Amino acid sequence: MITQIDFQIAQKRALEYLQRAGIAITPGDAENIEVADYGLGELWQTGLELLTYLHSDRVCARELVLLPWQTCPEHLHPTMDGQAGKEETIRCRWGTVYLYTPGRPAPSPRARPPENRTRYYSVWHETVLRPGDQVTLSPDTKHWFQSGAAGAVISEFSNACGEEYDLFTDPGIQRVTLVNGD
Ligand code: ZN
């Protein structure tokens, strides 16, 4: 749960980041920026701002904003009933993104998960994304990412896949964000 005030602050800051990244934003887009706190109520640590351009039955395209040190928590997109899970390409547009996936763990990772949640972060192979760098994540692959001190803007391209199926490592996470006063 987040407060109406935090929702508005996050939306406004995300808009500023998108503008800084040189992304054209209509007034309608600005109103449609989603704020996700993953149900943990610690938005400035675990959270993400999203602007979805297209989410059809087949594809999804959107911008993600990470405010400074904000973390998109560890999750994977599962294969369900023989249907491949989401294949997701993330491309850094602005700022720096620390991405973690399965593989050889970084000896001294540059990102740090929110302190009280470290136990729910299990993959530590580090890829640093700067503007123009992109990585494609296969279905069923655990991943999480955090921005550096400056925040980051990321474009995400994927096949459509119900977010309700995303599997998060942290059992406390809920994908739907409740705004106090809704
Ligand atoms: Zn993902």
Image (spheres, rainbow, N blue to C red):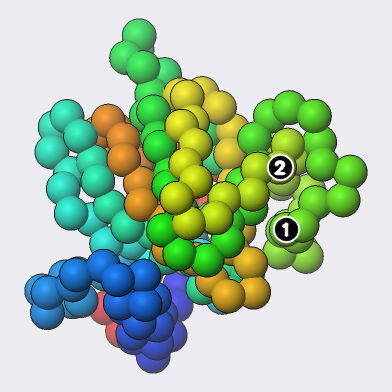
Residue 11, placed above or below residue 24: below
Q: What residue type is labelled 2?
A: Glu
- Furthest toward the front, the residue is 132
Image position of 169 (left or right of 182): right
Q: Is residue 90 above or below residue 152?
A: above
Q: Is residue 86 left or right of residue 129?
A: left
Percent position (x, y) of residue 150?
58, 75
Q: Which residue lies furthest to the right in this view?
A: 107
Dot 2 and dot 1 residues touching (CB under 8 Å): yes
Quadrant of the drawing holding the C terminus: bottom left
- The amino acid type, in three-letter code, at marker 1 is Ala
Can you identify the residue that label 1 sits on?
A: 111
Q: Is residue 45 visible?
A: no
Mark 2 Cβ inside 8 Å of ligand 1: no
Left or right: 116, with 45 as reference point: right
Mark 1 or mark 2, which is nearer the start of the sequence? 1
The spot of residue 82 in percent (x, y) is: 35, 9
Distance, label 2 to label 1, CA atoms, is: 9 Å
Residue at image x 27%, y 62%? 51
Question: What x and y, as percent, mark residue 48?
Answer: 45, 63
- Name the residue tied to disc 2: 126
Instruction: Name the image quarter holding residue 59.
Output: top left
**Considering depth in this image, is 118 or 14 the residue closer to the camera?**
14
Q: In which quarter of the image is the N terminus?
A: bottom left
Question: Which residue sits at x=52%, y=66%?
Answer: 95
For the view shown, which residue lies furthest in the top direction? 82
Question: In this view of the protein, can residue 113 be seen by the observer?
Answer: yes
- Secondary structure beneath label 2: strand
* x then y, percent, for residue 37: 47, 66
Q: Which residue is drawn at 40% across and 37% down?
A: 89
